[in-house]
Structure formats: C-alpha cells, structure tokens
Amino acid sequence: MRVVLICFVTLTIVLFTINHNTNAGCNPPVGDVITCTPAAPNPDFMGVQQSGNNNDLTVNVLEGTEINTEDDELLDAIRTSGGNDLINVTRAIVRGGDSGIETGGANDTINVIGALVSADFRGIEAGNQDDTVNIMEGADIISTGEIAIQTGNDMDKVTVDDSTVTSFVNDGIETANAEDMVTITNSVITGGPGFFAVDLGNGDDMLTLNNGADLRGGIDCRDDFDILVFAMQVPTDELDELTAQIEASDPEGGSITINRLFYEWENCEELVADLSGGFISPVPTLSEWGLIAMAGLLGIVGFIMVRRKRRVIV
C-alpha cells in the first residue's frame, strides 16, 4: 500500500509538472504568468514548454537567468502555442536545441532586451499572423543551423534596435507571408554565405532602414509589392545626391553606399528616399568596438610592462 501511495504521489507531481509545462527553474504559473529567475537550478535545462492551446500566457525571463536545452535537438528553450502570448527576455541567456523562442498562435509579442538568444535551428520563430518581435538594447540573436529570426503568416512586425542578428547558414531575418514590416536601427544583421541579411518572403512587405542599419548580406524582396525605405540621416551636403541616386535606382536590383554602409537589393517594387540632412557622428561598428577595446587593453598591458622594466632598472 505504501509503495502504491508513493507511486501515486510521484505520478501526480510529474503530471502536474507536465501539465504546467515548466520546471523548477521557472516558477509554477501564477494565473497565466510564468517567471524564470536566476535562482537554482540555473541553467534551467527544460525551459518553458507550453504545448497546450492556452491563450494570454505571459513568460518573463529575468536578468541573470539561463535556459539551456542544447542537449536535446528537438527541444525549444521557450515554446508557447496559444494566441495573445507575451514573452519578455531581459538580459538573460536562452539557448535552444531546436528554436530559442517559438510561438504558435496569433497576436503574440516577443521582447528580447539585452539578452542572448541562440539556437541550433531558429533563434526566434513567430509562428502565426499579427506577431510582433522586438529586439533591443544590445540583444544578440544567433542561429547556427537555420534562420535567425523568422515570422510565419500575415501582418507580422520585426523591429531590431541597437542589437545583432546572425545566421551562420541561412537568412538573418525572413518574413513568410503578406504585409510584414521590418525596421532596423543601429544594428548588424548577418546572413550566411549565399543567403540574405533580410528576406521579405511573399506578400506586400516593407523594410525600413534607419541610422546604423548594417546589413552583412543583401536584401531579397521576393514576390508581390515590396517597399524598401532608406530613412537615414546623412550629411547635409550629400542629401540631394543620395536622394537622386535612390530615386534613379532600379527597384528590381541595385546597390548604394550610405554613411559608409553598403546596401544591395533585388526583386523590390519601390524604393523610397526618406533621408534627412544633418550632422552625422560616425558610430563604430561592433567590429570597430572590438578593435577599440583591444587597443585599450594592449595600451594597459604596455603601460604595466614599461613600469615593470623601470622598476627592474632602478
């Protein structure tokens, strides 16, 4: 009888855990809210697996938290499948064996703030229509085996601000169907060899490039009516010339250099010159920041070595 009771209690705990699709690293839901904290166990090797059709779920991954499902190639780090879900990842680390973050329903919002999201498959996959993906404040989205950010059906919005999006083997950002909007500001978007930094997929899409939009790879507008908007601030004495270049370019294929950044596109239907004139203070790229940091470190090391030599001589 005691053995039966123990088995029953154990099974109840297991079923409770599966039913709530979370584990000890992410607190049990309070209502429709799951909170992941840096409290033990950290890293969390199961992540958030919300495989039912619950709507209006909120997942908050707090600063310092690490979720890591890399050992299971079929397991997302964070997965929801209902609609109207909200996922906030703030200065945390999320590593997925399959996708880093995946949503399945409509009207989902994913906010990644200063966090690292990486995956062997897709970094972020917003699976249905009317989804919003916001990448900001130094976030890094990385895919080693597929697309870094992919949206599913119609009316999706992707905004990348002061962050990096990198795919080593495929497109950096890809939208799937109609009427999607992508906006990039002060960010580096990298596509894999032979792929695109931004692929707008099918439908009537719009890509807006603001100051510091650094695309390491081309732009493919693909099918239907797609609009490419250049909305940077440029030196006043270059404004008229750059505007004229954009207006004279062929939307179906061409290239231009603006503020030392190179842009190349194909299969677009309209190019929009929404440039403004003004003083531009050159912003170091991420690679330039690395060189600056290295120069500073070498300078410190050199200073220390000189001081040591002087002491030896004395």
Image (cartoon, grey):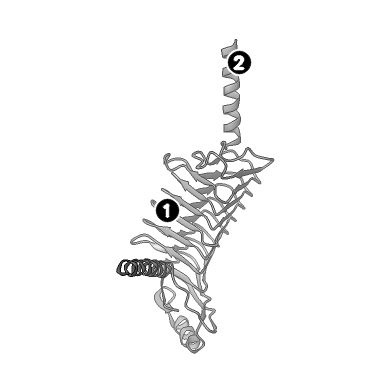
| Residue type, mark 2 in image | Leu
Q: Residue furthest bottom?
A: 237
Q: Position of residue 104 (x, y in %)?
A: 55, 47
Q: Residues within 10 Å of mark 1 (few under 14, many from 20)?
A: many
Q: Position of residue 132 (x, y in %)?
A: 58, 57
Secondary structure under the numbered disc 2 in the rendered image: helix
Q: Residue furthest left?
A: 313
The residue that label 1 is drawn on is 143
Q: Residue furthest front?
A: 314
The residue that label 2 is drawn on is 5
The residue that appears at 43% across and 39% down in the rendered structure is 72
The mark that comes first in sequence, 2 or 1, is 2
The numbered dot on residue 227 is none
Q: Answer above or below: position of 243 versus 193.
A: below
Q: Is residue 31 left or right of residue 203?
A: right
Secondary structure under the numbered disc 1 in the rendered image: strand
Report whether residue 252 is seen. yes
Q: Residues within 10 Å of mark 2 (few under 14, many from 20)?
A: few
The residue that appears at 43% across and 80% down in the rendered structure is 249
In front of the other: 170 or 5: 5
Q: Is residue 255 left or right of residue 52?
A: left
The residue that appears at 42% across and 67% down in the rendered structure is 293
Report whether residue 217 is seen. no
In front of the other: 38 or 14: 38
